[in-house]
Image (tube, rainbow, N blue to C red):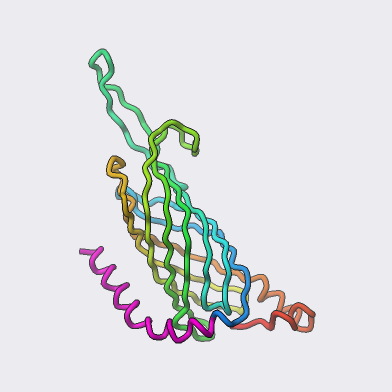
């Protein structure tokens, strides 16, 4: 039921913002661009427990209204699972293994509502990755443990509040849809995700402190 409500919410937002998106897209692509580099951490539910997923993003931002790029994410938390196996003597052996997964993705984040301090955007990312179990807590990509391929699609909603031109707070809620889900891995990767962000724009701080600098005159000034 909760999943259905979440999907319906995104469909409503996508429908209402579609015309505005198409009208603004051409203008945005012809605006000035800058590098979008981020290190992020978000939380999702895996096997009814809260797990942390870390990611690195690199792309291009157009007039701070559209961000396009790619990145890599991986499960940071340890998610153990106990496996039971019958040995040659007929006895039951227990083994603890840890769930691991990582994926490459492309992302697009379009701002469709913006005031001086508030901003509402719709981030979407899609990609592919691998999931597996291994005995070691740390990642071992060269391990012989069987790996399972999956595809993912993750739409979301982001709210951002600017305290200063160069500093703000934000939060996003998304849902990770997984296709070709590795059925032999009991921890389903489908899950809502949540993150809280501390936002800092060093270029805007520089423009604010150095309004007469040649870089500010070329790429600035600082903007809300």
Residue 224 horizontal side relative to residue 90, left or right: right
- Name which quarter of the figure residue 221 lies in: bottom right
Quadrant in which the N terminus is drawn: bottom left
Residue beneath the point at 40% across and 37% down:
98
Magenta residues, start to end? 1-28
User: Who is closer to the viewer here, 19 or 12?
Assistant: 19
The percent position of residue 156, horizontal first and vertical second, equals 39, 68
Classify 76 as above or below 223: above
Query: Residue sitting at 62 percent across and 68 percent down?
Result: 35
Residue 9 sits inside the magenta stretch: yes
Residue lying furthest left? 1
Quadrant, the C terminus: bottom right
Left or right: where does residue 203 sit relative to residue 48?
right
Q: In x, y percent, where is residue 214?
A: 79, 80
Q: Residue at x 45, y 83 (%)?
A: 113
* Residue 169 highlighted magenta (yes or no): no
Picture mark count: 0
Position of residue 87 in the picture relative to residue 126 (left or right): left
Q: Residue at x 42, y 49 (%)?
A: 129
Q: Could you tell me residue 71's position as x and y percent? A: 52, 57
Q: Which of 172 and 68 is in front in this view?
A: 68
Q: Quadrant of residue 96?
A: top left
In this rendering, the answer to whether 30 lies above or below 97 is below
The residue sitting at the top extreme is 89
**Where's residue 38, x and y in %?**
57, 62
In the picture shown, does residue 42 fall above or below 46?
below
Secondary structure predominantly adopted by residues drawn in magenta: helix
């Amino acid at each position: 039921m909760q999943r259905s409500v979440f999907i319906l919410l995104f469909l409503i937002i996508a429908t209402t913002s579609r015309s505005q998106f198409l009208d603004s897209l051409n203008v945005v692509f012809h605006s000035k661009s800058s590098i979008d580099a981020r290190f992020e951490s978000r939380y999702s539910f895996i096997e009814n427990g809260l797990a942390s997923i870390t990611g690195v993003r690199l792309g291009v931002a157009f007039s701070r209204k559209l961000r396009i790029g790619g990145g890599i994410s991986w499960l940071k938390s340890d998610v153990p699972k106990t496996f039971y196996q019958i040995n040659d003597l007929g006895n039951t052996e227990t083994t603890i293994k840890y769930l691991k997964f990582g994926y490459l993705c492309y992302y697009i984040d379009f701002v469709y509502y913006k005031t001086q301090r508030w901003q509402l955007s719709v981030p979407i990312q899609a990609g592919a990755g691998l999931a597996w179990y291994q005995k070691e807590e740390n990642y071992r990509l060269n391990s012989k443990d069987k790996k399972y391929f999956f595809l993912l699609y993750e739409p979301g909603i982001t709210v951002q509040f600017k305290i200063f031109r160069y500093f703000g707070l934000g939060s996003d809620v998304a849902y990770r849809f997984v296709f070709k889900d590795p059925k032999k891995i009991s921890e389903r990767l489908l899950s809502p995700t949540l993150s809280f962000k501390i936002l800092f724009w060093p270029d805007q701080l520089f423009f604010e402190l150095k309004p007469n600098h040649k870089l500010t005159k070329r790429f600035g000034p600082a903007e809300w």
